[in-house]
Amino acid sequence: MVQAGNNLKVILLGTGTSHGVPMIGCECEVCRSDDPKDKRTRTSLYVERGDVSVLVDTPPELRLQCIASGIRSVNGVLFTHAHADHVVGLDDLRRFNWLSGKAVPCYGTSETLGSLERMFSYAFKEMPDYPSSKPRLELCTIDGNPFEVDGFKIIPISLRHGCKMIVGYRFGDVAYCTDCNGIPDESFPLLQELDVLILDGLRETPHPTHFNLSQAVEMAGRIGARRTFFTHIAHELGHSRTNASLPDNMALAYDGQIVISETG
């Protein structure tokens, strides 16, 4: 899996909304679709440059996503925010403890990391009398400044998710902006000259905390990346039918999709 030079390898591990697709108890056309690209686990991302790799978020299906895409190592985990569909697979990180013999560094805002400590309190308590395995995690607070994971530079991007501010990330010429319905003016300079933009594009109808598809297309046009892929997709959007209606340099992403950015 290691890429030579400055190339970035990006795997869209999951591209679905918080319910996933198919949804429980739904008989719509997309939920019943035979197209594997209409099967969407909860949203997450894996980014690899050389021998350094990072995971963005830990959704409920993290174990299955890592198995499906052959993920064997993680140098750090970046959290966008602490909503359940982005964090409840946290316990699966303990497998990476076994593989590396080390704690897994976890990066996020103080608010997000505080939520993780409350939600997964067992992982952060010393329990010498309890023999069960638990993840070993190193919490690393980020602010608006760039930071590095084992020499891999990452730039946080402030995004609006309804009334909440969350974090997107830029890796070289690739930016990941999930779960947003607004991008503050101060974040636009961080989204210039992109090769790849991965952007929230939930559904056709408006939503109070996510871009709908037309808003996402408009925002992608404003940002002007060479290629744009939409993620966090609900069951209203069939993969092939929707892609046929999009501009040539834009498309719905799909689970397991690999994108290489040679500009890095």
Image (spheres, grey):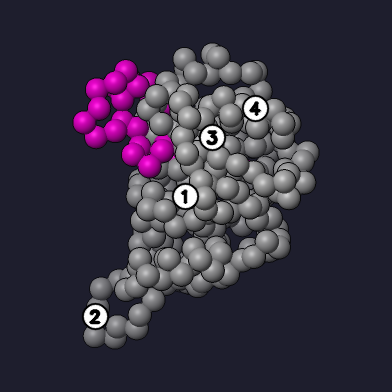
Q: CA distance from mark 1 to mark 4?
A: 34 Å
Query: Residue 12's x, y, as percent?
Result: 51, 40
Does the magenta segment cover residue 28? yes
Camera-side mark, 1 or 3: 3
Q: CA distance from mark 4 to mark 2?
A: 53 Å
Residue at 38% x, 42% y is 18
The amino acid sitting under disc 2 is Tyr
Under tag 2, what secondary structure?
Answer: loop
Mark before the other along the chain sequence, 1 or 4:
1
User: Which mark is first along the chain, 2 or 3?
Assistant: 2
Q: Residue 209, how many percent across, how many down?
A: 49, 42
Q: How many other residues sit within 10 Å of disc 4, few (<14), some (14-19) or many (≥20)? A: few
Q: Nearer the viewer, residue 8 or 59?
A: 59
The disc label shown at residue 211, or none = 3
Mark 3 and 4 residues: CB-CB less than 8 Å, in contact? no
As measured in the structure, the alpha-carbon distance from the residue carrying label 2 to the one carrying label 1 is 29 Å
Q: Residues within 10 Å of mark 3 (few under 14, many from 20)?
A: many
Give the residue type that dot 1 points to: Ile
Identity of the amino acid at label 3?
Phe
Q: Residue at x 55, y 43 (%)?
A: 180
Crowding at dot 1, Cα within 10 Å, few <14 / some 14-19 / many 20+, comes out as: some
Q: Which residue is mark 2?
A: 130
> Which segment did they paint magenta?
9-37
| Residue 46 percent coordinates (x, y) | 53, 48
Residue at disc 4, secondary structure: helix
**Disc 3 and disc 2: Cα gap in Å?**
45 Å
Residue lying at 60% horizontally and 49% vertically, measured from the top left = 159
Residue corresponding to mark 4: 218
Q: Which mark is residue 71?
A: 1
